[in-house]
Amino acid sequence: MARGKTTVFFCQNCGYESAKWLGQCPGCKEWNTMVEEPAAGKGSGHSAGSVMRPAAAPMSLKEVDLREEERMTTHIMELDRVLGGGIVPGSLVLVGGDPGIGKSTLLLQVCRHMAADGRKILYISGEESLQQIKIRANRIGEFSDDLKLLCETNLETVERTIRKEMPAVAVIDSIQTMYREEISSAPGSVSQVRESTSVLMQLAKGLGVSILIVGHVTKEGTVAGPRVLEHMVDTVLYFEGDRHASYRILRGVKNRFGSTNEIGVFEMKEEGLTEVKNASEFMLSGKPEGASGSVVSCSMEGTRPILLEIQALVCHSNFGIPRRQATGMDFNRLNLLMAVLEKRLNLQMSDCDAYVNLAGGMRIVEPAIDLGVVMAVASSFKNRVIDEKTIAFGEIGLSGEVRGVSQAAGRVAEAAKLGFTTCILPAVNAGQIKEQKGMHVIGVRTVRDAIDLI
């Protein structure tokens, strides 16, 4: 009796492979993420057309050359910042995000700028026709003849085209549409996505072609999203933000050629994505005047200080259990900070609803905004207006102490540049700040010291 096809189980979240089904993935500890897929054939990842590199020989550490890779600029400063200065030749970059958030638009703009520099660019789309790409291109601007378009989903055809054209940069939009005929599973499955990325990685490293991959993230998680590929690529960029809003945030979560957690801010307009060069000013636009519960704080995103407005609304509840809601920050962190206010300052808010919002749609996990959150909540509870030219940042402990934060000088300098005149910060950082014209620095040791100022 003939044996059936060999199958294996893959985790949709991290790509862990198992011979049997498991309720919990041993790799990422997520539940119910294992799916059954046909096992890759013997020729997986090594087709006849694959690029074979010469065998590497071991060398001593002293023989390693430290010459910096020459980067290719995209002429989009926000994107170059996130990439660490530009695209490294032979690198594999993954751009992830929700459908419709602007990934294809941004990469088409990158292709336009780089083709204008005289570089050969190949844009491969498995989702749109040539006419659809042309419509988007007409909205963006004029394109050079060095940009070539290809609508194809067969991975072998894509591989042959890249080897024949030898472009400086190739864009794959998207990896979920690519498939290899030897694998019987559907396009977008874990097996197809892993195999496609493996072949593209061989092409990038063997030919020196920079390849930009688009990956979709779905809410249901029914297809293999970019998380499966993060360990295979050199750089991972994620688009954040609501696709119905005008702004987009591009965040680097992995970069073998630069720092991580750098962000770039873009605004979606009719002609495409445009850079927001002063992100702090953009986040503070529309800030109300003379309103209680509004405080400006500062968070570091990589090496970049971002000023943002923290809004709080505290009002008496008509129900036995008061409501707490946090938008843009950790909900449990808000409960902790309100408990510190009740215990250390005797502010009785146990019968009050509390709502905290980080205006601008930013999602912040850095504890440096704790002092701003506490001051905003106290300001709303006491109905006291905080001077609009005041900024506050610092981490708060359970004893009510205000702890120091990193890169305090950069935060103060960013605030001074935007016209703020008073900065409330941890006392341990205040002694390290050089005096700046027009900026009054106030160091506080406890939450009570900060609240007494308002």
Image (cartoon, rainbow, N blue to C red):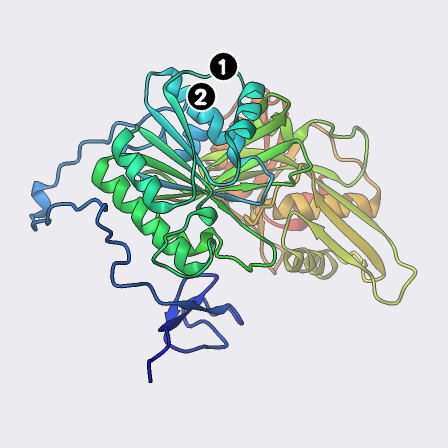
Residue with the most extreme right position: 318
- Can you identify the residue that label 2 sits on? 112
Question: x, y (%) of residue 269?
Answer: 63, 24
Quadrant in the picture for the N terminus: bottom left
Question: x, y (%) of residue 226?
Answer: 46, 51
Question: Secondary structure under badge 1?
Answer: loop
Identified by mark 1, the residue type is: Glu
Q: Are there few (<14), some (14-19), or many (20+) residues within 10 Å of tag 2? A: many
Image quadrant where residue 62 sits: top left
Q: Residue at x 75, y 35 (%)?
A: 386
Disc 2, disc 1: CB below 8 Å? yes
- Can you identify the residue that label 1 sits on? 142
Q: Are there few (<14), some (14-19), or many (20+) residues within 10 Å of tag 1? A: few
Residue 109 visible: yes
Image quadrant where residue 70 sits: top left
- Camera-nearest residue between 233 and 104: 104
Image quadrant where residue 454 sits: top right
Residue with the most extreme bottom position: 1
Question: x, y (%) of residue 184?
Answer: 40, 61
Q: CA distance from mark 2 to mark 1?
A: 8 Å
Identified by mark 2, the residue type is: Arg
Marks 2 and 1, the one that precedes in the sequence: 2
- Camera-nearest residue between 166 and 114: 166
Residue 173 in the figure: left or right of residue 206: right
Q: Residue at x 62, y 50 (%)?
A: 446
